[in-house]
Image: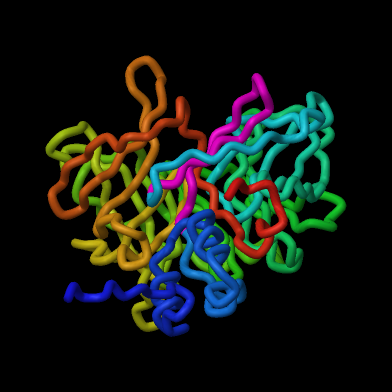
Amino acid sequence: MAARKMLFNWEDLPPELIQSIANQLGDLVTFLRFRLVCKKWRSATTLSNPPPQLPWLLDFDHHNSTFHFYSLSTCKVHTIHADRKIVFSRDWMTPSYHYIFNCHGGLKVTHFLFNPLTQKRIQLPCLNYFANHNPFLIRPNPIRTQECIALMTNMRLDSKQILFCRPGDTKWSIIVKGPYGGGACIFYKGMVYVNMNDTGMTKVISPVTNSIVTLIPSPVFSTKGSREGFSYFVESLGVLLGVRWSKGICKTHLYGFEVYQLLKENTHLKWAKMDTLGDRILFVGSHNGFSFSARECGGLEGNCIYYKALDDDRHEYLMRYDFEKFIAERVPCPLAKVATWFMPSLEESIESNVPV
């Protein structure tokens, strides 16, 4: 007699196993689809404790007011149409949590935060003069306005400054009054860290008093870089990392990367060179970025850096630098252009336009 085929009901999976599987889903859309399978799976995977979400690559198409999101973990592109009344500047898109920092206007420039998934917009103070402004980052979570920080450089004439504000402020505050080197900048543990391109020194500035709290000397770099200081600041496992383009260390391209971590020695802060990133993956762009564990990244390898590059014709493409092998390789990406990294918010996107 033939063995009777046993049928298994997927709803009978133990809750702890369902949760374990869900924890491996590092893509927002995949996680939402997983929860739609049945009521029991939704109960076992609460939105208050989601798996770590990887950043998406984001670009904006001006011709049809469309945002394109690319997921490295699923290799899929998601498309969302934006309100045509909202004018975006693609050059203003920087790595950000949940919201993108943008502007439009001429002599009177309007600045705002915009969530491309929920279409929510948070107005920021205007600037009443035309200048060459560049955004740096937004501190999460913008909906909790007390935790939101927007930083911006004013490259007007020869007076390079850094401005900051929070939603609800009526004006931008200057926290770096003198010229600075135009280097990496980040909001970290309540302070603004500004790296000077010309000297490599890092200024630690209080946004409350607008004063310099301490100066961190530049490390002694072992190779020549594209600048004297750091190209990016990234917070990783609670530690501040300085990432630098370095010449002559990559076996396949002109530039590779060096990474330094900020350490406290007695009462002083100093930069120490890292020989390995270990399990970590860095996603960098426009002076800052994100850090994740490879165990949370659904198949991506650790000890590497993902970044945007330009070819001789100024075409954008995605690259991956192997920190152990000292090689850089191109990563397939279907987006015609690569604007920035975008960290989606699961809680704010449940009722949004994300196609699942």
Which residue is painted at 78% across and 47% down in the image?
121
Percent from the top left, x then y, of residue 314? 41, 19
Question: Is 230 placed left or right of 224 in the picture?
Answer: right
Q: Is residue 35 above or below residue 174?
A: below
Where does the N terminus fall, quadrant-wise? bottom left
* Main secondary structure along the magenta-highlighted residues: strand
Residue at the far right: name it: 170
User: Which residue is rendered at x = 83% and y = 50% of the image?
Assistant: 171
242 up-or-down from 48: above or below: above
- Residue 172: x and y in percent read 77, 49
The image position of residue 123, as x and y in percent, is 82, 47
Report whether 238 appears left or right of 251: right
Q: Tell me which segment is drawn in magenta.
A: 54-72
Given residues 67 and 238, the one toward you in this image is: 67
Q: Residue 115, position in %: x, y?
A: 69, 48
Toward which corner of the image does residue 291 lie, by quadrant?
Answer: bottom left
Q: Is residue 181 visible?
A: yes
Q: Look at 37% across and 74% down and name the residue there.
A: 8
Q: Is residue 183 visible?
A: no
The residue at the point 27 percent across, 34 percent down is: 330
What color scheme is it? rainbow
Query: Is 240 one of the magenta-colored residues?
Result: no
The outermost residue toward the top is 313
